[in-house]
Image (cartoon, rainbow, N blue to C red):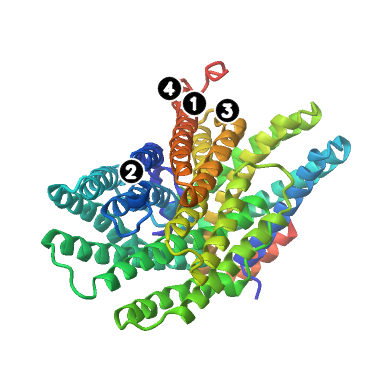
């Protein structure tokens, strides 16, 4: 099967990843609006229905959306795992994820149980279709690299996250919360953040950072053992949750591992051999710095509420990294597809999205994170954070759209016509 | 034993280093030195393509009968990279730093995704299919 991944014909049509990437900032705007029109007391309380809605607007509408889109593109290249009917697969996963996210989050925000049924139905379709195929394809790969191994662990963690989420949704639908409800909640969060999110980010970083910036590899131990240790610890920690055992020692190990991942990532980026300035480096560095910061906050429970931790981990670490990745992927895919179709004179990768515009976006994104953090102490800043977050997502959307439109404009022309893209 | 995978992967890394040295010279606008580094990088990259196309791909194609499979795709991407090398030469000649880095970024991305596919699939396939002939193939590549 591995030869299939080498053909561009086997990669998904470019419209597949693009629709996932363009949908994420739209959910970002919705999330910003939610922050803007909510009471600070409710939105900063992690167990309030509003906060549950907000968290899932991010984890489903932004995080899963970008990860699902990127994985469909990465699996053929990084693992040789080819999806047979990519357009059909992409359509099912994308449309059900959009409808599921809307149904699920609206049910919590407006307290309408009917929407929860719709949300659960569509999210089940999206997650089951996506992970069933991922697991099937990734476990068929014959030549294993650290990235493929981490992707396998990511897909199993994703499936477990979904199953735990489904159980929780049924508790809500039936309005009966068992005594160990919070053990389910904590396990769901654990598998979502450390399994689904971090395992994939680690696996991809092992490949992408040294390759794209010509920098040092992560140490072999980190590449080969860390994901496996994290994966095993997820189960042990979940066990501790259900038996109400103190997890401080496990937190210490998790934090130690993620801090070392972050350290080696930053070290590799800071000692890269390529001198050229690349704005995506800012996103990577901010992201890894925020990961370290969040681990320290989590380890020592520095703030009573988890609001600051959620902002730093979610927007500071995860969203910064995802945005940086999308800014790398869109211009490359646009250029690569056009070049492969025989267009000789093309804009360079850097000309698809203007760097200056990405920089503006970066600063607005960063200020939204800072405002949200200050907002915990001085509530008015929450609103400033919300406004900055909305603007940031609009800029992200526009920048992506500009790159995609440039691609579409050229793709409509004759490959031999040299004047069309001037 | 040296495998196709270890030998050619190492050569990828050596080309990456040459690529970074070339970019360093352009970044400091040492155009004369940049041109020297570009020639070195270009020669090394084309030599790498020759080793693959003339020796390894041919051996793989004869053994497996797959002439329109992965090797055909890799040859096509080599052509894309050859085109970009010409663009880089034009930019160094006209000392157009801005455009140079646009093209070098395109080449870098193309090279790296190409390398990933080779290192993670094609080389492993070649080592598996060619079996006992692997050391001869490696020696023949070194002889080019």
**Residue B48, position in %: x, y?**
68, 52
Mark closer to the chain start, 4 or 1: 1
**Residue A394, position in %: x, y?**
44, 32
Confirm whether circles 4 and 1 share one chain.
yes
Q: Quadrant of residue B136?
A: bottom right
Q: Quadrant of residue A222?
A: bottom right
Mark closer to the chain start, 2 or 4: 2
The secondary element bearing badge 2 is classed as loop
Q: Chain of mark 3?
A: A
Confirm whether circles 3 and 4 share one chain.
yes
Q: Is residue A338 visible?
A: yes
Q: Is residue A297 left or right of residue A22?
A: right
Confirm whether circles 2 and 1 share one chain.
yes
- Real-space Cα distance between discs 3 and 2? 47 Å
Mark closer to the chain start, 2 or 1: 2
For mark 1, what is the residue? Answer: A406
Q: Chain of mark 1?
A: A
In-front residue for pair B24/A185: A185
The secondary element bearing badge 4 is classed as loop
Residue located 34% across and 67% down the image: A156
For mark 4, what is the residue? Answer: A412
Residue A346's label in the rendered image is: 3
- Real-space Cα distance between discs 2 and 1? 38 Å
For mark 2, what is the residue? Answer: A38
Circle nearer the viewer, 3 or 1: 1
Q: Chain of mark 4?
A: A
- Real-space Cα distance between discs 2 and 4? 45 Å
**Residue A388, position in %: x, y?**
48, 37
Neighbour class for label 2 at 10 Å: few (<14), some, many (≥20)?
some
Whether residues under marks 2 and 4 lie with C-beta atoms below 8 angstroms apart, the answer is no
Mark closer to the chain start, 3 or 2: 2
């Amino acid at each position: 099967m591995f030869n299939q991944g080498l053909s561009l014909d086997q990669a998904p049509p470019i419209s597949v990843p693009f629709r996932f990437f363009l949908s994420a900032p739209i959910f970002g705007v919705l999330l910003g609006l939610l922050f803007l029109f909510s009471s600070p007391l409710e939105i900063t309380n992690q167990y309030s229905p509003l906060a549950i809605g907000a968290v899932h607007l991010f984890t489903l509408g932004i995080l899963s959306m970008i990860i699902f889109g990127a994985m469909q593109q990465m699996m053929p290249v990084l693992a040789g795992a080819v999806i047979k009917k990519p357009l059909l697969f992409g359509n099912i996963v994308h449309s059900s994820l959009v409808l599921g996210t809307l149904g699920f989050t609206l049910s919590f925000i407006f307290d309408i149980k009917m929407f929860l049924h719709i949300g659960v139905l569509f999210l089940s379709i999206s997650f089951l279709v996506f992970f069933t195929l991922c697991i099937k394809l990734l476990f068929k790969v014959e030549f294993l690299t650290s990235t493929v191994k981490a992707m396998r662990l990511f897909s199993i963690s994703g499936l477990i996250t979904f199953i735990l989420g489904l159980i929780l949704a049924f508790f809500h639908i039936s309005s009966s919360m068992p005594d160990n409800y919070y053990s389910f909640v904590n396990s769901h969060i654990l598998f979502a953040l450390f399994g689904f999110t971090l395992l994939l980010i680690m696996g991809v970083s092992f490949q992408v950072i040294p390759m794209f910036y010509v920098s040092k590899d992560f140490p072999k131990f980190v590449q080969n053992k860390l994901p496996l240790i994290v994966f095993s610890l997820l189960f042990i920690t979940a066990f501790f949750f259900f038996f109400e055992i103190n997890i401080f020692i496990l937190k210490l190990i998790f934090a130690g591992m993620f801090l070392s991942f972050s350290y080696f990532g930053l070290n590799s980026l800071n000692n890269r051999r390529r001198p050229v300035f690349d704005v995506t480096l800012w996103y990577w560095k901010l992201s890894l710095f925020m990961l370290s910061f969040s681990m320290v906050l989590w380890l020592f429970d520095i703030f009573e509420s988890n609001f600051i931790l959620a902002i730093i981990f979610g927007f500071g670490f995860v969203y910064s990294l995802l945005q940086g990745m999308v800014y790398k992927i869109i211009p490359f895919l646009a250029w690569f597809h056009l070049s492969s179709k025989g267009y000789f004179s093309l804009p360079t990768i850097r000309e698809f999205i203007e760097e200056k515009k990405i920089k503006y976006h970066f600063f607005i994104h960063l200020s939204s994170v800072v405002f949200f953090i200050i907002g915990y102490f001085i509530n008015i800043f929450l609103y400033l954070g919300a406004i900055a977050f909305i603007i940031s997502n609009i800029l992200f959307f526009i920048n992506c759209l500009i790159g995609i439109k440039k691609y579409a404009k050229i793709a409509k022309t004759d490959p031999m016509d040299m004047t069309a893209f001037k | 034993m040296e495998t196709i995978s270890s030998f050619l992967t190492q050569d990828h890394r050596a080309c990456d280093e040459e690529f970074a040295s070339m970019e360093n010279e352009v970044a400091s606008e040492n155009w004369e030195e940049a041109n020297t580094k570009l020639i070195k990088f270009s020669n090394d990259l084309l030599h790498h393509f020759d080793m693959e196309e003339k020796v390894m791909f041919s051996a793989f194609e004869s053994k497996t009968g797959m002439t329109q499979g992965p090797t055909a795709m890799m040859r096509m991407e080599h052509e894309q990279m050859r085109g970009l090398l010409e663009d880089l030469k034009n930019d160094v000649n006209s000392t157009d730093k801005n455009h140079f880095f646009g093209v070098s970024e395109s080449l870098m991305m193309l090279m790296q995704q190409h390398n990933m596919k080779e290192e993670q699939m094609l080389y492993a396939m070649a080592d598996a299919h060619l079996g006992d002939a692997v050391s001869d193939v490696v020696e023949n590549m070194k002889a080019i």
